[in-house]
Image (tube, rainbow, N blue to C red):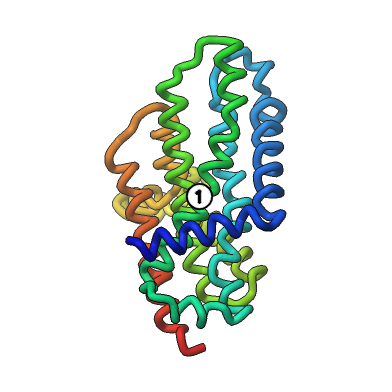
Amino acid sequence: MMGTGIIMRRELASYFTTPLAYIFIVIFLMMSGVFTFYLGRFFERGQADLISFFNFIPWLYLILVPAIAMRLWSEERKSGTIELLMTLPVTVVQAVLGKFLAAWLFIGVALLLTFPVWVTVNYLGEPDNGVILASYLGSWLMAGGFLAIGSCVSATTKSQVVAFILTLVICFLFVAAGFPMVLDAFTEWAPLWMIDGISSLSFLTHFDAISRGVIDLRDLLYFLIMTVCWLTATTIVINIKKAD
C-alpha cells in the first residue's frame, strides 16, 4: 500500500502544479451553477432541493471526467516516462490504484467545492439533507466508474485525444443503456431478462435510485464492481503493453 500512496501523492501534486486542475475546477463549478440555477430552473420551480444539480451531473461528468482520465496513462506512454515508472519499486497494480485514487480524490475535491449550492438551498428552504448527502455519495461513486473506464482507455493509446473520445463514447453507452428509447428498441424482440440486463448496466439506473435517497447495496456494488473491473482491465493492458 505504501507504493500506492507514493504514486497517489505524486499524481495529486502534479494536478496542482499545472493549470489543468484550476481550469477543471472553475469549469466544473461554473457549469454546475448554470445547470442548477439556469437550465434546471431552480427559482422557477420554487423547491429547496438539489434535484436539478444531480440530474445534470452525469452529463457534466461525461465531458469533464474523460478530460481528467485521458492523461493518466497516455501522457506517460507518449513521453516515455512509463518505463521510468515501471522501474520504481511499485507494482503495476499499485501504480494503477495510485493514479486512479489521485484523480478520484481530485474530482471529490471539485465536488466538495459545490458546497455553496448546498448552503444556498438550506438558506432558502428546508431541503432533505439526507437525500442530498446520498446524492453526493452516488455522484462520487459514479465519477469513480467514469474514471476507471477512462483509465483503461488511456492505457491503450499514446494519444490523449483518442483516449478522450473513446472514453466519452464508452461512458455515454453506459449512461444511455437505461434510456427508455434504447430499451424500447429491444422490447419487440428481446426477452425480458436481456432488457433488464441492459438497463442494469446503466449508470443512470443506479444513480437515480441513490439520488432519491434510497441507498441500496446493489447500487453501491454496481459502482464498486464497475470500478474494480475497469481498473483490473487497466492493469492487464499495461502489462501487455510494457514492451511497446
**Residue 230 in sight from this viewpoint:** no
Residue at coordinates 61% horizontally, 56% vertically from top-left? 15
Query: Residue 146, how many percent across, how many down?
Result: 49, 54
Within 10 Å of disc 1 (Cα), the crowding (few <14, some 14-19, many 20+) is many
Give the residue at mark 1: 175
Query: Residue 74, how many percent across, how many down?
Result: 58, 72
Relative vertical location of residue 106 with respect to residue 40 in this rendering, above or below = below
Using residue 65 as the reference point, say whether residue 225 is left or right of it: left
Residue at coordinates 68% horizontally, 17% vertically from top-left? 43
**Residue 71 in sight from this viewpoint:** yes
Relative vertical location of residue 235 with respect to residue 21 in this rendering, above or below = below
Q: Amino acid at mark 1?
A: Val
Query: Residue 92, how many percent across, how many down?
Result: 39, 73
Q: Quadrant of residue 133?
A: top left
In the structure shown, which secondary structural element does the residue marked by tag 1 occupy?
A: helix
* Closer to the camera in the image, 76 or 69: 76
Q: Quadrant of the N terminus?
A: bottom left
Relative vertical location of residue 184 with respect to residue 226 in this rendering, above or below = above
Residue at coordinates 65% horizontally, 42% vertically from top-left? 28
Q: Quadrant of residue 19?
A: bottom right
* Closer to the camera in the image, 16 or 35: 16
Query: Residue 203, how many percent across, how many down?
Result: 45, 47
Q: Quick one: which residue is furthest to the top in this view?
A: 125
Residue at coordinates 52% horizontally, 78% vertically from top-left? 82
* Closer to the camera in the image, 125 or 204: 125
